[in-house]
Amino acid sequence: MVEKASGGSAATAGGDEARKECERTDDGHIPFEGLPNTRDMGGIAGADGRRVVCGKLLRSGALDGATSHDLDLLRDGYRLRTVVDLRTEEERRKKPDPEDALPDVRFVDAPILNPASLGIAKEGGIKGLAEAMRTIEGHPGDLMKRIYVSTMTNEKGQRGFASFFEAVLTTKEGSALWHCSAGKDRTGIAAALLLHVLGASPDDIMEDYLASNRFLESRTQEIMDALAAHRLADRLDESVRVLNSVRPDFLQAAMDAACSVSGNLDAYLEQVLHVTPEKQETLRARYLA
């Protein structure tokens, strides 16, 4: 885990705000101006009849599109204290987080994938994207499942998820946010693992994961429209939709991979990601009400 130095804490007088239960509406979506897939996990049912507290655990896509209004809301409204970046070094270099605008936030680099594991180029313009997709062998859905499996079985992914949990654990006040590029795959797996620790049901975990499809649909359509303008759409339409969406079998592939490593998900969390029962209890005590 690489922590980027930041300014000191700006906690309000009197310490952290009181934990409170919140009603979950619109899949927790936060209507930011430049961050289409940022969501508050508050309100999801967890262990012992408790629910995830609101305003504490945020999942998102890349933060480079945040407007000044968005940054003000993150800083002052959500009292953001930790950002965990699950992207590769190249992704961070091309679209860096707005660290200067959030001086009281700790930024943690926790890359999940080796660059070669991405399988497709997400940069280089529409023509570059089209060319990259044409080189994919087999169905793009199969590629996505291979990537999901890789995040759980390769050492880099395991270190990244372990760093993610450690960053959330050490956020003792304010909110923690984690993100990748679109906020759907690496971010979705991290959210699923955390929700499992918090005692959420498999159905609620899957519902939260699949909600990304709603908030990324406009971006998918923009890409397809751009491909059509370049007369590159034809058979690529399906690939675009698959690569810019999430499906139940993608997440299931990741969970099955974790079980193949350690026998079951709980053992994977403890043995591979070092989220011990004591740490799990700390997370539940802090993030459930």
Image (cartoon, rainbow, N blue to C red):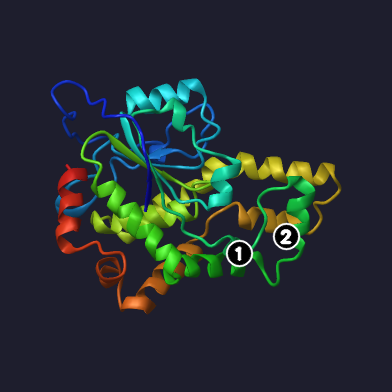
**Quarter of the picture holding the C terminus:** top left
How would you rate the neighbour count of disc 2 (Cα within 10 Å): few for under 14, some for 14-19, many for 20 or more?
some
For the point 63% across and 41% down, the residue is 219
Residue 263: % across, % down = 31, 79
Residue 78: % across, % down = 32, 29
Above-or-below relation of 277 to 220: below
Helix, strand or loop for disc 1: helix
Residue 19: % across, % down = 18, 34
Q: Is residue 91 left or right of residue 270?
A: right
Q: Can residue 98 be spotted in the picture?
A: yes
How far is the residue under mark 1 from the one under mark 2?
15 Å
Q: Across the whole image, how many numbered discs are drawn on residues?
A: 2
Dot 1 amino acid type? Ala
For the point 58% across and 40% down, the residue is 95
Q: Which residue is mark 2?
A: 133
Q: Is residue 109 left or right of residue 173?
A: right
Q: Which residue is mark 1?
A: 116
Between marks 1 and 2 in the image, the one whose residue lies nearer the viewer: 1
Q: Is residue 143 left or right of residue 33?
A: right
Residue 231: % across, % down = 86, 48
Instruction: Name, please, the residue furthest toward the right.
Output: 231
Q: Is residue 129 left or right of residue 199?
A: right
Above-or-below relation of 220 to 119: above
* Of the pair 152 and 27, the residue shown nearer to us: 152
For the point 53% across and 51% down, the residue is 89
Above-or-below relation of 266 to 231: below
Q: Are marks 1 and 2 in contact (CB under 8 Å)?
A: no
